[in-house]
Each structure stands twice: as C-alpha cells, then as structure tokens.
Amino acid sequence: METLVKNPIQFTNSAIEEVKRLMQEKDFDSTQILRVGVKGGGCSGMTYVLDFDTQKDNDTMYEIDTVKFVIDNSQSMYLLGMEIEWQGGLNSRGFTFKNPNASSTCGCGTSFSV
C-alpha cells in the first residue's frame, strides 16, 4: 500500500519556474534541495526561510512539478496552507508568502507572527 502525503504548501507557477531557473544556474550545487521554513526574527517575530540546503534527519521531502523541497517537521505547523509566489515586476520583485496561519504580517511580507 502506498501512502501519499499532501504537500503542506503550494507554489504558484511563477514560483516553480523561478526555482527551476535558479537550479539551472551554472554555479548551482546539485547536491542541495530547496528548503522552506521559518526562523525567529523579523519585525513580526518569525521570518520565512527559502533557500537551498541539504536534507536533515528531521525533514520531510515533498515534490511539486519535479521540484523537490524539504520542511523541518517541527516547522510545518507554521507553514500549513501557505502559498509561495514569485513576482518579477520592477516595483515588486521576489518571492512572496501568503500564510493563512499568520495572525499579523509586516509591510515587507517576509515576517509574521502566529
């Protein structure tokens, strides 16, 4: 019997394409995978982490459209239901996070509290 684990977060098509583009850079370390997480800090209490890293023992691996990513099991409750989007405009460029678990966010959109 196969167990399917539903992805706790979603990426928009633009975010997936940007991650794939970054992974195609000539200096990309192909031994690393995308890490989605949180850490203490920021103006609202917690900051989002979106970086390339190695998989650790406490991680669960997920995959969306051939992009593999990991989330530390202790952080998944803060990220459940979140959507990550890439905005490539002149005035707003970068990844944005829409988190239904956040009770408040800062103006920059990368910091939140629960």
Image (tube, helix red, strand yellow):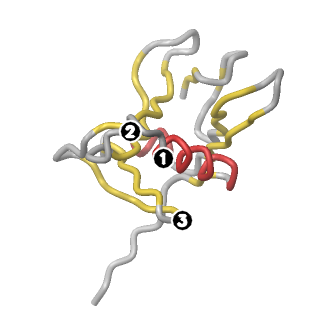
Residue wearing tag 3:
65
Image-based side of 90 in relation to 81, left or right: right
Name the residue rendered at 75%, 34% in the picture. 88
* Closest to the observer, 94 or 104: 94
Circle 3 — which element?
loop
Q: CA distance from mark 3 to mark 1?
A: 15 Å
The kind of residue on which mark 2 rests is Phe
Q: Which mark is residue 28?
A: 2
Q: CA distance from mark 3 to mark 2?
A: 19 Å
Compare marks 3 and 2 and give the one earlier in the sequence: 2
**Image coords of residue 8 (percent x, y):** 49, 55
Compare marks 3 and 1 and give the one earlier in the sequence: 1
Quadrant (top left/top right/bottom left/bottom right) for the N terminus: bottom left
Q: CA distance from mark 2 to mark 1?
A: 7 Å
Q: Which mark is residue 24?
A: 1
Name the residue rendered at 47%, 67% in the picture. 6
**Image coords of residue 17 (percent x, y):** 62, 51
Marks 2 and 1 close (CB-CB < 8 Å)? yes
Judged by depth in the image, the label closer to the viewer, 3 or 2, is 2
For the image, the number of numbered tags is 3
Q: Which mark is residue 72?
A: none
Location of residue 84 with respect to 66 vertically, above or below: above
Circle 1 — which element?
loop
Mark 3 Cα within 10 Å, few/some/many (few <14, many 20+)?
few
**Image coords of residue 81 (percent x, y):** 58, 51
Location of residue 42 with respect to 26 vertically, above or below: above
The kind of residue on which mark 1 rests is Gln
**Image coords of residue 35 (percent x, y):** 39, 41
Image-based side of 6 in relation to 106, left or right: left
Furthest-front residue in this view: 26
